[in-house]
Image (cartoon, rainbow, N blue to C red):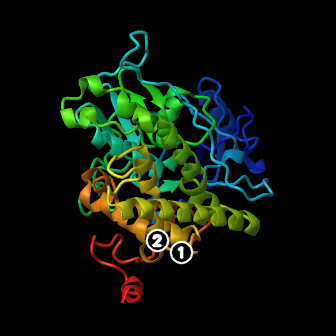
Amino acid sequence: MSLRFRLNLAAVRSPTLLLPRSILSSSLVSTIVRTSTRNISTLLQPFPLPHNTAHKLPTITKRTLGTTTPTMATSNKITNWVDPNDKTGEFKRQVSSFRSFISCSDPSSPFPAEKGRYHLYVSYACPWATRALIVRKFKGLEDIISFSSVHWHMGELGWRFPTADEGKEGGDAAGDQVVPDPVAGKQYMREVYFGVDPEYKARFTVPVLFDKKEGRIVNNESSEIVRMLGTEFNAIVEDAKARELDLYPEDLRAEIDEVNEWVYHDINNGVYKSGFATTQEAYERNVTKLFEGLDKVEKHLKEVQEKGKGEYWFGERLTEVDVRLFPTIIRFDPVYVQHFKCNLRDIRSEYPAIHRWMRNLYWNVPAFRETTNFLHIKKHYTCSHPQINPKGITPLGPVPDILPLEEEVEAVKAAKN
């Protein structure tokens, strides 16, 4: 038989093997059944080439997966951002599955705050992961919580870890700590998930806060990871300034919660609901709501800036609101305008207050600039969504990715004259 097969991890939950009719009676079937472990189902079918063959996914072997082959239903295909059977065309973000909490005050907590115990898996491309990385820097946790970034490409098997050369300067995924998995030597983030829960059936998202001591995922919800990193390690942070920084101060909590709520729905997730929409109605509804949200942000920041009392959402006080909004805004012109069709307006020419706020954070606050990697951002979106950009062509513009503080685009210069 000349037809070759590779293991497809997007397998069905049923123990029945799906094989071409021509080989159902062959010895291959009995061989597969004999060698399967722990009764985990395996689906064999011709394996499709990755979208971008220049970034071919490493071969999955029994060695790299351990002794089991976890499976997912084919209806849960990673690249199906909208359920093909959902006639509304709406993108619906999944609820995070791992929701434990690190505690510095509860002695009975299974996850105490300890130096060197936890690892943060991120993607520089992902805005949700970037917010956690920003807080890690702000809170002086570089020597307390290790981190690493996956490769920017997401294929049929989800996020993959880079090779040693890909993350180096000059590599196609260059960046700080863009390295092979330093914790368990896995090839894919899915293996990290399945190593903790072999029956896991949702998406393999980042960020992931991982307990290296117990081999468990603590949490994969970015908002909760941000909160943990911002508060629960204060007792062991050596830098006094970092320790005292409170991104969720008690006197502003009600306002922060209120802003975070509508910013999440209308803007953070709004760009995805616009870009992944599969009907015109869903797209128009969500992109309209997105720009209503941006207009609201512009109005607020303009009022703050005109008072001359600071450059953050709350004037002189940096909070979670700035941390959670920035990763979306910094990606807006380079990616969301063209790739997600969020093109009613751009930031640099039509939102002067947002533009000023964003550039101040990027150029004047190192934690924001040092966690922004435009290579990963632009390549991920344009090469990982074949349903949106089938040829994987990455636009050269805008140039530059972000303007210097005092420079403006020609349209803005002309408007001021």
> Which amino acid does the dot numbered 1 rest on?
Arg
Please, what secondary structure does the residue beneath circle 1 have?
loop
Q: Is residue 406 left or right of residue 254?
A: left
Q: Is 216 rendered above or below residue 93? A: above
Depth check, front residue: 342 or 177? 342
- Indicate which disc residue 72 carries: none
Question: What residue do we see at 47% from left, 48% from top?
Answer: 128
* Of the pair 179 and 41, the residue shown nearer to us: 179
Report helix, strand or loop for mark 2: loop
Q: CA distance from mark 1 to mark 2?
A: 8 Å
The image shows residue 18 at horizontal and vertical percentages of 73, 43
Q: How many labels, in total? A: 2
Q: Which residue is mark 1?
A: 345
In the figure, residue 229 lies in which quadrant? top left
Q: Amino acid at mark 2?
A: Tyr
Q: Are marks 1 and 2 in contact (CB under 8 Å)?
A: yes
Callout in the foreground (1, 2): 2
Is residue 61 visible to us here?
A: no
* Residue in view at x 55 percent, y 44 percent: 258
Q: Look at mark 2 in the image and give the residue it sits on.
A: 351
Residue 81 placement, left or right of 152: right
**Residue at (59, 71) in percent of width and height:** 341
Q: How far across and down, in percent of the image, does residue 396 sit?
A: 40, 77
Q: Residues within 10 Å of mark 2 (few under 14, many from 20)?
A: some
Residue 262 x, y percent position in the rendering: 58, 50
Q: Quadrant of the C terminus?
A: bottom left
Residues 27 and 362: in front is 362
Q: Is residue 196 visible?
A: yes
Q: Residues within 10 Å of mark 1 (few under 14, many from 20)?
A: few
Q: Position of residue 113 (x, y in %)?
A: 34, 22
Query: Would residue 173 be found to the left or right of residue 26 on screen?
Result: left
